[in-house]
Image (spheres, rainbow, N blue to C red):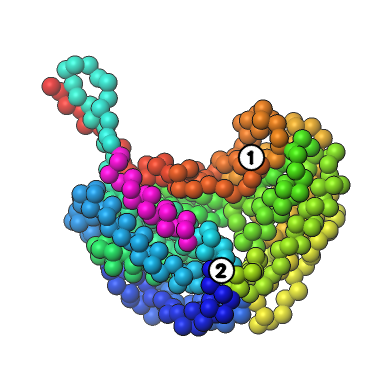
Amino acid sequence: MKTYEEWQRLAAEITIPNQAYINGQFVSALSGETFDCVNPSTETVLAKVSSTDSADVDVAVEAAGKAFKSGVWSKMAPRDRKNIMLKWADLLAQHQDEFAVLDTLDMGKSISEMVDIDIPDSIDCIRWTAEGIDKLYGEIAPTNGQNLALISHEPIGVVAAITPWNYPLMMATWKIAPALAAGNSVILKPSEKSPLSVLRLAELATQAGMPDGVFNVLPGFGHTAGKALALHHDVQVLAFTGSTRVAGMLMEYSGQSNLKRVWIEAGGKSPCLVFDDYKDIVKAAQGAAAAIFTNQGEVCIACSRLYVQSSIKDAFMVELIKASKAYVPGDPLNPATNMGPLVDKNQMDTMAKFINSAQQDGATLLLGGLPEYQEGKGFFVNPTIFADAKNQMKFVREEIFGPVLAVSTFDTEEEGVALANDSKYGLGASIWTSDLSRAHRVSRQLESGMVWVNTWGDGDTTVPFGGVKASGNGRDKSLHAMEKYTELKNVWIRL
């Protein structure tokens, strides 16, 4: 790990990409429009980034479609496609410090988290997915002896991916790696709040040997570039991570256009259940704190609803407050910082709105509180904890996407499960118990796409990531992700 001073020097010297990447080259938006990319730690403008719209979408889709139909990537030998993607991952590894700084400056993520989590995960995602390209086989159906039925997976065409601002590089690789591995052409629209790292990633794809038009990046806004992609008749698949509200709009746009497949990873309001049989209260409290205050709470799987069994509540809360106070806002370029700023003023205002709502509804403030904003000093906030939270309270039901924790108690296992499931969301959940049977029993009952037992947030590229209910229908990572970007074809031959 570099020192604070070394990261600061690298940040001062780094080249900031600021144009769209279409058909193998950087280009300005056809309109000439730009938007400010702001450092949330200092509120200074990092770059004026090209703001693409429907006209640029048309150009990118045409380039992507032309590349797909030519077969330059879609019909390339799987092993050759794999080797290019492996070289791409190697280039990302060679430039990993540059990428770590880009996301830290752009979004406010701590540099230590970028180095320890986001960068290694992104590299692994590209490498692991690439290695799967030439290891996926078709099938022969068990028909009668007079016929041969072949089942194969084929690339679909042009895939559009719309990715969030909270994990700019990592969550982009989760979508583009399997889509590209399957042989599709991809157009990525990153969030306008953090577009920088994926623009550089596209440049490295070309350097690795990926043909022009196969991977394109369109920085811009959801109501312009995002909507145009969702409505485009020559986009066959739309993959999205973001809010449930926008997810619903994108599904409507699919119905208004060509019924493109829409894979959604939407909001979350994940529960954490701590049972009184768990032997290490300190560890559970530290886990519960990490589950909400990691990445400033700007995490879709954040366990923002904490349910503690009544018999251990008092002892547990002492340890929870202690663990939470360890999260101290600071300059994210400092390796010692474990909590950077929120991404922008809007996010800070949203947090303040929900804190006010919690107090008005009768929740008890135990730690933190309203942000103390000073213009020009960054969007830094403190960990905030409310006790006496009720499931009907607005701040308990709605996704805040900030470091605000709602704490409640339960008496029985059945009550805990009922409270945990009382949500429109179903992305992640965490259970803390030393009873193996309870761990299996409760995890089966929880309405969630992912359940962590005696931990939170663990995983790697081998396991799928996604939720149920209003949290969406998509799955990133694992071989299940690649299935989302292929057509299943049946060829029946009469012998």
Residue, x 78% and y 53% (percent of image)?
320
Helix, strand or loop at mark 2:
helix
Q: Amino acid at mark 2?
A: Ile
Residue 453 shows which numbered tag? 1
Q: Is residue 192 above or below residue 321?
A: below
Residue, x 33% and y 51% (percent of image)?
130
Helix, strand or loop at mark 1:
strand
| Boundaries of the magenta span | 119-136
Q: Residue 340 occupies which quadrant of the picture?
A: bottom right
Provide residue 453's location: percent of width, then percent of height.
64, 40
Provide residue 317's location: percent of width, then percent of height.
82, 50
Majority secondary structure of magenta residues: helix
Provide residue 136's location: percent of width, then percent of height.
30, 39
Q: Relative to residue 315, is residue 268 drawn left or right?
A: left
Asked if residue 135 lies in the magenta stretch, the reply is: yes
Residue 123 shows which numbered tag? none
Distance between mark 1 and mark 2 Cα atoms? 28 Å
Provide residue 98's location: percent of width, then percent of height.
45, 72
Residue bearing the label numbered 2: 111
